[in-house]
Image (spheres, helix red, strand yellow):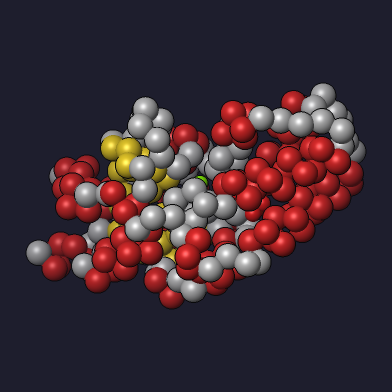
Amino acid sequence: MEDEIDQIGFLFDLDGVIVDTAVLHYKAWRKLANSLGFDFTETQNEELKGVGRMDSLDRILGWGGMTLSHNEKLEAAARKNAWYTELTSTLTANDALPGAIDFIERAQEKGIKIGLGSASKNALPVLKQLGITGLFDVIVDGHALTNNKPDPEVFLKGASGLDLLPSSIAVFEDAGVGIEAALSGGMTAIGIGPEGALPDAAFVYSSLGEVDMELVISLIQKNRS
Ligand code: BG6
Ligand code: MG
């Protein structure tokens, strides 16, 4: 059994799966939108989950009916990022989502390979704030990516960093584009979110603490058989 477990991996999204930073991204983007003279709703913000920084800015500017030059966009994204990093600078392990760190530790103790697959360029500092960088065998973040989710690049790079085939991996995601990325990469996709969300995921749990690890392992075994 141990040998078999050694051959599987879990790839985790960060924002909204391990830590509740989705709300901090929202706060910072909203502050930017307000400074430009408009606002957007929490429902609109749902569409930004898993979406890269510049793509998020384009969508937000679209909602406000605004056009900015390339340099103005870079400056706006930098302002948002400065606010975001200020908000994340006080995070600690207590800000991890329910059961998240315990679940990753239990998986690691079982011999499952562990990786991070995040669109965020702030992933590493956030993991450091939480004190959990050492739990990951591979970290793929926004700095390593050419294509954003739903492109599977982030998880395919994670799989190759773990030296595993995509079929041997389960991805844990809170964003629709992330579930899409995992599925198009040939992996088992587990949703983290409210009931009824993420209809394409094999299962959806409210937090990592609720996940039935044995069930996920059996889904991976089925996927690769
Ligand atoms: C994703 C978040 O994880 O990272 C998005 O869900 C965010 O909301 C994206 O825009 C990019 O993050 P960052 O930290 O590089 O601006
Ligand atoms: Mg996320």
In this picture, is 21 found above or below 69?
Answer: below
Residue at 57% across, 52% down = 21
Q: How many marks?
A: 0
Judge whether residue 33 can be spotted in this image: yes
Quarter of the image where the C terminus is located: top left
Where in the figure is residue 93, as x and y percent of width and height? Answer: 48, 68
| Residue at the extreme left of the image, as rendered | 1
| Residue 178 position in % (x across, y down) | 47, 41
Q: Is residue 145 visible?
A: no
Q: In the image shown, does 160 or 209 lie closer to the viewer? A: 209
* Relative side of 110 to 27, left or right: left
Q: Which residue is depicted at the point 65% across and 43% down?
A: 26
Q: Nearer the viewer, residue 221 or 85?
A: 85
Tell me the quarter of the picture where residue 101 sits: bottom left
15 or 188: nearer the viewer: 15
* Drawn side of residue 167 relative to residue 180, left or right: left
Q: Residue at x 87, y 33 (%)?
A: 37
Quadrant where the N terminus lies? bottom left
Q: Quadrant of residue 187?
A: top left
- Residue 156: give x, y in percent of width and height: 43, 51
100 on left or right of 8: right
Q: Position of residue 165 (x, y in %)?
A: 31, 54
Q: Is residue 19 left or right of residue 168?
A: right
Q: In the displayed image of the protein, which residue is found farthest to the front?
A: 94
Q: Quadrant of residue 7?
A: bottom left
Residue at 65% across, 66% down: 89
